[in-house]
Amino acid sequence: MNFKRAIYTISALALLFGLWGVFVRLTTGHREAAYGSYVVWGLWVAMYLFFAGTAAGAFMISTLDLLFHIKIFKGTGRTALWVGLVSLAAALLSIWLDLGHMERIWKVYLQGDLGSVMAQMVWGYTLFGLLMLASLYLSIRNPQSSLLRTLMIVGLPLSLFVSGAVGALLGVEASRLFWHVGLLPVQFPVFSLASGAAAMLVVIGLFGQKESPNRSEQLWVLSVLTVALAVVKLYFLWADFSQSMYGNVPQNVEAVRAVLYGPYWWAFWILQILIGTLVPIFVLVQPKLARHNGWAGWMGVLVLFGFAVARANIVFPALTVPEIQALTTAFSGPHLTFDYFPSLMEWAVTLGIVGMAVLAFLIGEDRLPLSSKEA
Amino acid sequence: MLGVLEQQDVLVRMHAELQRALKKKPEERRWVMVIDLRKCVGCHACTIACVAENKLPPGVVYRPVLDEEFGSYPNVTRRFIPRPCMQCDEPPCVPVCPVNATYKNNEGVTVVDYDQCIGCRYCVTACPYGARTFDFGLTYTDNTPDNFPFLFGQANADDYERHANYEYGENRQREGEKSPIGNVRKCHFCLHRLAEGMLPACTTTCIGRATLFGDANDPDSLVAEMIASPNVMRLKEELGTEPRVYYLV
């Protein structure tokens, strides 16, 4: 069994598992979920942030070819757009399943309040998705079209806006000090670009065309970008956490401590920092390994994994800190806890969405004319 | 002693004030709740009354009572803080709603339009008081054996849970995944009771008369009198949310 076929099989199995999860979700509502009224957003929201960020980042990477015409990236634009579209679909599916009333999503479009950051984000991502779709269509049918260039020019700031809006979605919440950081809308586009670069490392490293003359250079440039952004990400983390600890505001300190030393400390130190950041940095700073298809590709996988964990480490800790300490014991009942670990249904749905996204990417890779001959 | 007994029960006074307030235009009223922490004994009767009045399912609570303990032996004391929705004048939960499902009504009470709410729970994360809970669709009789359907068991027992609660004056049956299941829910000062000239359930049930309710725009009302005291405080005032729930300490 070759590598691609193995990925097809694993993704299909993940999708099957996910279908079971979606079945449970649709037949039992949110009853089987582990999130509750205190930790009110769970795995699906974190994955929404992750996929939406990757979509925006993939678009940013596509501009290297389709807008800036950087020679070594020639031929990668369509693939990046496809990655962005697939990622955006995964993001929207993840957040749609999280809604209490999925059938009312149309209200955000027809009866929405554009003063709400969430409404702005929904509108922004919808426009962004349509723009990516149109860009992909034009890049396949008429790559020289001036409309394509216009779409890319409009799309670049739009991708910054939508990824920033995700940061703003959390940042505007003054009651959650862990989120209420002025720089969050600035950090998120950086995270997006980093996950877009990592996604392209995976795509080019593991699924790229063997005959592509630029492949090793592309991997090297993407590796440098990934490492640089990983260092920036570490700096942001340091700045955020050290300021919070120094400021010593109890609610904020408690959230930071939950990340660093809480019951899920291993998710931060081992998954996010060690596996998702330090190992890839160590490998990708070595030019020989960074240019190696397999090494670069798998490091991209690790970086993406680290970003997914990082999103969870942004969403959950703020919610695990009680708004008022005595709330923890004031009233007991199902879904009234400040602890959270995703339920089997939540894992199933998320794995299914990942499986669906990988399958959709592979099918697009095989069936759509994504790679140009010049590449 | 006799003098105290001869005093009019505050419930009678508040009831009369309520009738007076209801004669005014809704926008001219300013509903306010005052909770005297020195009188609260932590009996949780208000919590239970609220659950019964609004037929709240498991995991949904509008008015928990926070139990705080201070000091160390032998100097130990406890304080009970009932925590309804603060009905903030600057509510952080309102502007974040993507579909205007939660808003301040013309009486200044923050309400939820169950048919408009998409269940995104953004408002829950925005509330600094933890005053909003999500209806996961559970019932207290879930998993009850159903061996004798005509006498015992879920089929009979959960009828009560499915009866309409008349929140917001609506006859809303609780079934399937229909609203309010899948919605965010919160205290609304028992608007449906106010409309009928009754005080909120938590107020009438309070055994220590610690919970007071009325129209603060009425200068002769008990609540107007109370919130002018120097020993009044509001939760998290520093956030600028301007709560309409006051505590006497």
Image (cartoon, coloured by chain):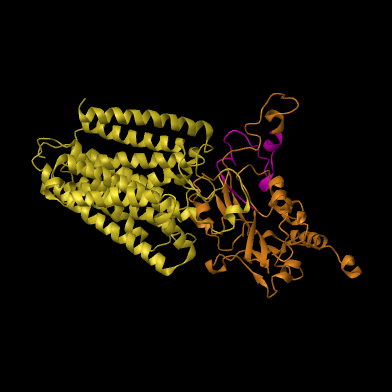
Chain colours: A yellow, B orange
> Which residue is painted at 71% across and 53% down in the image?
B44
Residue B165 belongs to the span the image colors magenta: yes
Q: Residue at x 27, y 35 (%)?
A: A361
**Residue A292 lies in quadrant:** top left
Q: Residue A122: x percent and y percent?
A: 40, 47
B241 and B148: which is toward the camera: B148
Left or right of B151 on screen, residue A158: left
Q: Residue furthest left?
A: A213
Task: Decide which of A185, A7 is in the foreground and name it.
Answer: A7
Q: Quadrant of the N terminus of chain B?
A: bottom right
Q: Is residue A96 magenta?
A: no
Residue at x 44% of width, y 40% of height: A96
Range drawn in magenta = B158-187
Residue found at the far front of this picture: B74
Q: Residue at x 59, y 40 (%)?
A: B179
Would residue A223 be found to the left or right of residue A246 on screen? left
Residue B170 image offset from top left, x and y in percent: 67, 43
Image quarter in which the C terminus of chain B is found: bottom right
The percent position of residue A213, horizontal first and vertical second, equals 8, 40
Left/right of residue B33 with respect to residue A200 in the rendered view: right
